[in-house]
Image: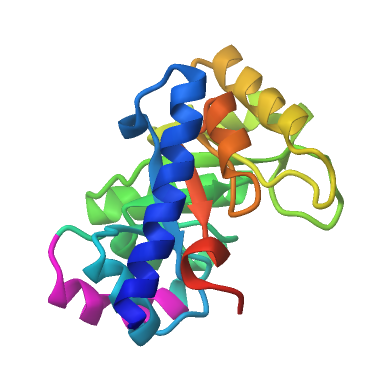
Amino acid sequence: MLHDDAAGRLHAVQDQIARATRVAGRAAEEVTLIAVSKTHDAAAIRPLIAAGQRVFGENRVQEAQGKWPALRGETAGIALHLVGQLQSNKAGDAVALFDAIHSVDRSSLVTALAKAMDAADRRPPCFIQVNIGDEPQKGGCPTADLPALLGEARQAALPVAGLMAVPPAGVEPAPYFALLAKLARDHGLAELSMGMSGDVETAVTIGATHVRVGTALFGAR
């Protein structure tokens, strides 16, 4: 029964993405669905893997280290994305474990990641996280500081794939997604990590290449 529920939820989100790509004149394959499995244990994750989901997102390095080595041992082809804040002292662990890092937001982290990537000879693609609503309580690089941080990342040979953002809660997200898309275009970046359970279709219509969905796939916490 659990597997059927997971498959049903996965198909519902895939249908949303397919609908939005049709509206935008894009191919559904252009959008990567990241199932955000933070706080969920292996028993909750396995049904989604069984339903065919292969890309997962975690918020914390330590939590991911606790459950993913075993899950990856059971199923080939799992990709793991770090979608939460990253402490500089965990850069080495993050580079070893994750296939993409979505939360590069400050100079010290650029330096730590570049060093870790050189040491491990592993270069997972990175997204610069932008504090798109300039909210003091939120992670992300202030919009005004993006050109400088991007310059530092490129100089450090960090593989920057695109930009990531979480729009302010409780307001229409479309203008924030559009701003992030414009910033990416202005800086020659192809990928956009934006959109969550409540605004997937809006994000995809505006150009998201990666959507980070938790609740719609796993149910409410």
Q: Which residues are magenta?
A: 63-76
Residue 190 in view of the camera: no
Q: Position of residue 78 (x, y in %)?
A: 23, 60
Q: Residue at x 78, y 28 (%)?
A: 144
Q: Position of residue 193 (x, y in %)?
A: 52, 40
Compared with residue 188, is residue 133 higher up or lower down, i.e. above or below? below
Q: How is the image coloured?
A: rainbow
Compared with residue 121, is residue 183 higher up or lower down, i.e. above or below? above
Q: Quadrant of the C terminus?
A: bottom right
Give the total of numbered labels. 0
Q: Is residue 153 left or right of residue 33?
A: right
Q: Residue at x 15, y 76 (%)?
A: 73
Specify whether residue 37 is painted magenta.
no
Q: Residue at x 61, y 23 (%)?
A: 181
Q: Quadrant of the N terminus?
A: bottom left
Specify whether residue 75 is painted magenta.
yes
Q: Position of residue 35 (x, y in %)?
A: 43, 60
Q: Is residue 10 left or right of residue 217?
A: left
Q: Is residue 123 left or right of residue 160?
A: left
Q: Position of residue 7 (x, y in %)?
A: 33, 65
Q: Nearer the viewer, residue 97 or 164?
A: 164
Q: Residue at x 71, y 24 (%)?
A: 179
Q: Is residue 133 left or right of residue 123?
A: right
The quadrant where residue 197 appears: bottom right
The quadrant where residue 156 appears: top left
Magenta residues: mostly which secondary structure? helix
Compared with residue 181, is residue 117 higher up or lower down, i.e. above or below? below
Residue 147 in view of the camera: yes
Q: Nearer the viewer, residue 151 or 183?
A: 183
